[in-house]
Amino acid sequence: MTQAPSAMLKIKDVAERTGVAAATIRMWEQRYGFPAPQRTASGYRLYTDRDVEAIRTVIALRRRGLSIPTAIERGREEPKVSAETHPSIYAAVTAVDPSAYPRVLRRTTLAAMSHAIEDEFLARGAHGVVVGAFQRSRFFERVGHRYRQIAPRSDATIVFADWPEVTDVPGEPIRVPIAPTDALGNEWAVVVDAPGYAACLLAWERPNRAAGGQRMFEAVLSLDPRAVRRAVMVAVALAGRRDPAIGTRLDELISGRPLATEPPASALTSLTSRMVAYLDEVDEPS
């Protein structure tokens, strides 16, 4: 038998890691084409860690009552991202959620929407993964008290800004540095991936300010659990680029984690986005 590369897994290894019998894995492959292992010259199956994650996702979805074909289809669709191929959270999400239509919004509108997403997470009391991108550390400090309240109530809270180094303190947000030249250095992000609650508000800052000097952003709001999960996966990949140990820990945290809810009707995300845009156009009372 050809020696398997160290990064590859035999079917018995996958069975041990997922709790799914090797015979079941073979049956899924024959019936549904999932997973799709590589083959050695002598015909032995070889799997990757991503295959393990996809199978774990299927098992989690089955526990929620989804049929095997539906769960496998969802597991197959699980996005694969990396810091190199998806350095922008905004771009990664808009690529998979067509209902997340971009709107040009003022900074004050984005701040209010962000607070609503954060407060809903706190009100629900459900553990999950929270991500925030703030461009500059001084912007984070304006709302740092909110994230210090969120962190101990979450499974993980990751915040990006131009800090000098990675900081990982128990009960505090994990601080991940970014450079102004990074794609994320020009982005605003608030992402919540929690049981029963998925939301992400993503934006990039336009170079030209509005009349009066207010910062303007092109923003999208998505309530699609798959798009939200993709945002989290990109954030984890970016964190792992700065600190591989943290990236590995976070990747293990989200691997096989069930999606927050069933995907909402695309019209819901679109309508919500439109309502926000209309509110943003309303002049503040004098």
Image: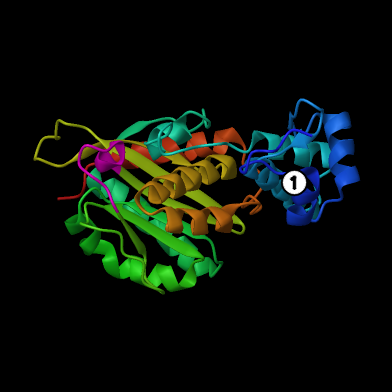
Q: Is residue 192 above or below residue 77?
A: below
Q: Which residue appears farthest toward the left when viewing the image?
A: 212
In the picture provided, is 264 more to the left or to the right than 137?
A: right
Q: Which residues are magenta?
A: 177-187
In the picture provided, is 263 more to the left or to the right than 27?
A: left
Task: State the quadrant of the N terminus.
Answer: top right
Q: Which residue is drawn at the image coordinates 43% and 41% (left, top)?
A: 221
Count of residue discs: 1
Examine the structure image and report whether residue 1 is included in the region drawn in magenta: no
Q: Which element is circle 1 on? A: helix
In the picture provided, is 213 more to the left or to the right than 171?
A: left
Q: Which residue is drawn at the image coordinates 50% and 54% (left, top)?
A: 248
Instruction: Residue 140: give x, y in percent of width and height.
Output: 24, 59
Q: Is residue 213 something that shows in the picture?
A: yes
> For this rendering, which residue is in front, 31 or 148?
31
Examine the structure image and report whether residue 186 is included in the region drawn in magenta: yes
Q: Is residue 105 something that shows in the picture?
A: no
> For this rendering, which residue is in front, 203 or 4?
4
> For this rendering, which residue is in front, 1 or 197?
1
Instruction: Residue 249: give x, y in percent of width and height.
Output: 51, 59
Instruction: Residue 141: give x, y in percent of width and height.
Output: 21, 63
- Identify the colour scheme used: rainbow
Q: Which residue is drawn at the image coordinates 14% and 30% (left, top)?
A: 208
Name the quadrant containing residue 29: top right
Q: Which residue appears farthest toward the top when viewing the image?
A: 41
The residue pinned by badge 1 equals: 58
**Residue kind at label 1, given as amino acid type:** Val
- Dot 1: within a 10 Å radius of its alpha carbon, few (fewer than 14), some, or many (20 or more) residues? many
In the picture provided, is 135 more to the left or to the right than 158?
A: left
